[in-house]
Structures are given as structure tokens and as C-alpha cells.
Amino acid sequence: MKRRLSPLFVFVLLALSGWTGSSGLLAEEPFPSTYAPLPSQTILITHATVLTGTGKRIDDGSVLLRDGKVAAVGPGLTAPEGAVVIDATGRWVTPGIIDVHSHLGLYPSPGVTAHEDGNEATAPVTAEVWAEHSIWPQDPGFRHALAGGVTSMLILPGSANLIGGRGVAVKNVYSRTVQGMKFPGAPHALKMACGENPKRVYGGRKQAPSTRMGNVAGYRQAWADAQKYQREWQQYRKAVEAGEDVDKEVPERDLRLETLVGVLEGRILVHNHCYRADEMAIMLDVAQEFGYKVTAFHHAIEAYKIADLLAAEGVCAAMWADWWGFKMEALDTVRENVALVDAVRGGCAIVHSDSAEGIQRLNQEAAKVLGAANRSDIPVTREQAIRWITINPARAMGIADQTGSLEVGKMADVVLWSGDPFSVYSKAEKVFIDGALLYDRNDPAYQPVPDFEIGIHGVLEEVR
């Protein structure tokens, strides 16, 4: 019996043969993305219920994927010559799911101490570290997330520190290197944390910060140092442009401050772990003082209390559906938190996982909020709710111009569901990334196994 080649095996063969595809590399960027889409076919998915991620629903709709992009969306599309046609009667189509808060690869399976690489808990400010330098691409969690329809994610350092380092956006593809997963053109993220975590970690060591006021003092000093470093380099470059002799005046390179200056210059997006409403407001004040922008507050248990303030500042809130009560700052939430943030004009609500298990069913997490909102007479439709796990996280990651919705010209990151994606009974049947079929629930050839699991997989095959 002949075996079909898995997408991972095909990828390796193409790489070894010299095929590179389009990477969009920036020569000056260290550790640049080498991601290149797998070859894809022209595919027309027809007779599906389509949630576009733009707030629209198309009954008996079609989606055309061509050259790795969304080529057309609407009712009654005609298949181009040579296209593969998928009759999706009774099924639903959505953009690929995007998780804005993941630690996959940083805390991979199996969960042992040797694999804990997400917190550089050696100083309150470690802006110099990059999450991508700890990510293990063979983490089985990536393929488990793919089976849940997740096509992209933001992988962040942990929350032990006031400033924990850079996060990285990745495409959920099989790769031998993290660079092969890096989302092309996506900005870096800066992970910050307020509240209990940093003051507990460092207060327990009898060093600052040990209080919330110590937290804020730590942020402010870090940003003040960054501003000074920024001025030194601005003065140096100005002198170079003026033709002055500056050989002895080159500022010493500081990787920690270099990252913070990237935020001040708008090149790196701030993602801030923060639970309480009052602390989120304070963090916005700190951002205003030093001239940077908070892109998203994560966890944001009390975001519903300041939903209007977040909307006015253009800040997203990435929240759980119903996690609460596991520490004091997590006590005062409501199940309608996400929906209440979404209900405010200009609000940007996101459902995130922060979990290797939760990322496998983000559609069900969003469904919990949908149900809670409707029971509380907060009108939320499926076409609205799908945005919480597609276009809104894409916006917070700075990639909404490329993915997150089914719009012509965007990456063909698409999920075909067995039914209503907000039903606990529905599963992702097919997952396309840049138009290439990466997962098929009904075809073992498109359920690739990472190298780490090959040994176990071989034993199971023998048993079968």
C-alpha cells in the first residue's frame, strides 16, 4: 500500500532541492524570517456557511483560494479551470484561528523543568531576550493547535518580569527552525507584566520590586534609560550626517535598551499582562509619559470596567472566556467581559489561550462568551464573535493587512469546520495556510507527526 507524503516531508524535500519561495527578508534584521509557503492548488470551497471575519456571514457561500491568497468570496462562485472543488454543504468556513497569547515552544511538551525556557527571571527588566531563541519547533503542541484550526500565533515570554523580552509572531507550520515559522513582516512584540507576578518573584528574593509602586518605578526608570540611550544615538547619527569626526563617540550598544527604543520608535508593539482596571489605567499613564503606545492588555480580567477608556485609546483587550479566581487580582471578572469590551464603539476584544490545551479549542472558548452574552441580553452574533479569534488578534499583532479575515488578496489561511464552529460538536476538518493543505482530519497523510513523536508513533502503527 502506497503512503502519501506528509506536508512536512514535502517541505523538507523542497528545501533540500533548493526551493526557497518568497521570504520577504530584510537584510538588516537579525534572525530574519525564512518562511516560505508550501506549494498550493487552486481550490474552490462551495455551499458553505462563511464567516468572513469582517462582521459578515454568507449563507451558501463560496471561497476561492488561488496562488496562496484569497481570490474571491461570495455566493455562487464558478470554479476556474483545473480547480479542486470542495462541496462544503452543511459545513462552515472561517479565517484561520489566531492566538495572540501563546507559550508553545517555550514550555513544550513534555512539561519538565528542562523545557522551561519562557521566563528569564534573573532581573526585573530583561528586554534584551527574544522568545524565538527559546522556541522548540518540534513541540507537539503546535500540531495539536493546528488540529484546532490555529494558523498563526504570537509567542510571548512569561510574566515573571516587569519587562520580559520580545515576543514573535509565527505561522503554525512544520519547520526545522523557528525562522522557518516566523511570520514574514510581522513586528516584534514587547512583553510587559504588571501586578502580582513581578512583585512576588522579586519581592520573594528581598529585592525590588516588592510592591505595585515598586513595579511602576521600575517601568519608569527603564523607559527613562531608554530615552537617554535614544538621544545618544540620535546625536551620534546627526554628527555622522554632519561629517564630524565621531570615531571616539560611538555609543556603546545595549541590547536591553535597543529593544525599548524600538518601542519608543513604534517598531515594536507592547503587549502588557495586566488584570486590574486601575493598573491598566496606570500603565496607560506611563505610556503617555514616555510617548509609546500599549497595543493590548492581556488577561484583562477587569477590562469591562474601563472598556470605554480602552476603546478611546485604541487598545485591545485579550481575555479568557471564564478563567478567574486563581489569585487575588483575578477575582473580579464577569463571564460577559469579552462581550462588554466588544460592545463599546471602537472596542477591540480578543479571546486568547495562554495554554497549550486551551489553544486547541479557542472556538469553544469564544462560544462560551457568546452564550454568556446572549443569556445576559447582550446581543452578539456569530459573525461578530468570530472576530475575537481572527481579525482582532491579527490587528493586535500588526498583521491584519495580511491575514485574519477572508478578503481578496489576503493570505489563504482558512479553516473548513464540520459544522457551526461555535458548537462543541464541531471540529476543524481541513486547515489551509497560505492556500496549502496543512491538516486534514480525514486523511492521515495530512496529520504529520513531529520528529519528537516519531518513535511513539511507530510503536502505535505496529500495534495497529
Image: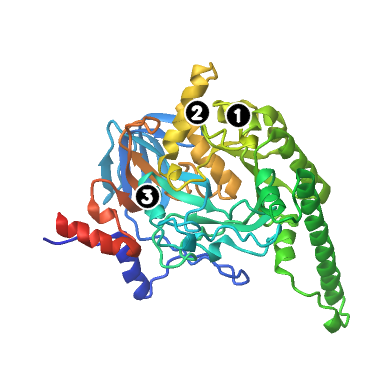
The residue that label 3 is drawn on is 144
The residue that label 2 is drawn on is 369
The residue that label 1 is drawn on is 333
Coloured how?
A: rainbow
Q: Which of 150 and 45 is in front in this view?
A: 150
For the point 41% across and 53% down, the residue is: 141
Where residue 15 sits in the image (x, y, percent)?
37, 71
SS label for mark 3? helix
Residue 194 appears in which quarter of the rendering? Answer: top right
- Spatial CA distance of label 2 from label 3 is 23 Å
**Which quadrant, please, contains the C terminus?**
bottom left
**Which quadrant, please, contains the N terminus?**
bottom left
Q: Which of 287 and 276 is in front in this view?
A: 276
| Residue type indicated by callout 3 | His
- Spatial CA distance of label 1 from label 3 is 29 Å
Where residue 258 sits in the image (x, y, percent)?
72, 65
